[in-house]
Image (cartoon, rainbow, N blue to C red):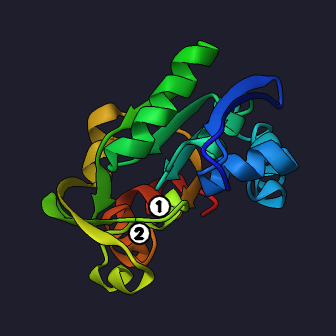
Amino acid sequence: TPDYAFSKDFYGLKYKGNLNNNIDANVFFYGAFEKPLLFFLRDTINAIKDEVPRPIFMDIGANVGQHSLFLSKFAWQVLAFEPYPKVSMQLQQQIAHNKISNIQIFENGLSDRHETLNYYAPTGNNEGIGSFDESSLVKGNRNYGRLELQEGDQVIQSGSWKGIKLIKIDVEGFEKKVIKGLSRTIEEERPVI
């Protein structure tokens, strides 16, 4: 797709993107990326509100933040984790442009321990396939350099968040370490993952 910047209505928000990004192109042409998943997440948050009036949504591997932006309209708070600066910057710009106050961005990844690992960044138009998993090199990713990861339970405990009821994890092969690092949070909060 061509290098073409656009601004489009995104469920009552303004979404600024570029057609040369796969997720942005889906927003431009189809209204959203993974639209059935977005609606599932929305419906789940709305169903949980009967039990927990202020549910928190965690978006782990937030990328450009399409899921975080959409869920900010339904969740009490969104915790968005995205270590790759190129896409986390786009999410920051979307938040500022829309004056959203209930999304908190963490510019680090999550793991089962505090560590710094090589991040393998995408080289094509799909910014969503970056990973800390070296095997992603076969997808054409390149070594971007070392980025920071935090233990998920420590991050949650330090922020004293209660009501984490929905977690989306999209970390391209690094899911096992993310879930292990959130084991206490998962046990205590019992979220939908």
Image-based side of 146 in relation to 165, left or right: left
- Res 87 → quadrant: top left
Above or below: residue 10 compared with residue 129: above
Q: Name the residue that disc number 1 marks.
A: 186
Tell me where residue 103 appears, x and y as whole percent: 52, 28
Circle 1: element type = helix
Give me the residue at 46% from left, 28% from top: 92
- Res 34 → quadrant: bottom right
Residue 143 at least partly seen = yes
Q: Name the residue that disc number 2 marks.
A: 179
Circle 2: element type = helix
Query: At label 2, which amino acid type do we have?
Result: Ile
Quarter placement of the N terminus: bottom right
Image-based side of 47 in relation to 121, left or right: right
Rate crowding at label 2 as few (under 14), some (14 to 19) or many (20 or more) other CA atoms within 10 Å. Answer: many
The residue lying furthest to the front in this view is 2
Tell me where residue 183 appears, x and y as whole percent: 38, 66
Residue 42 at least partly seen = no
Above or below: residue 107 compared with residue 10: below
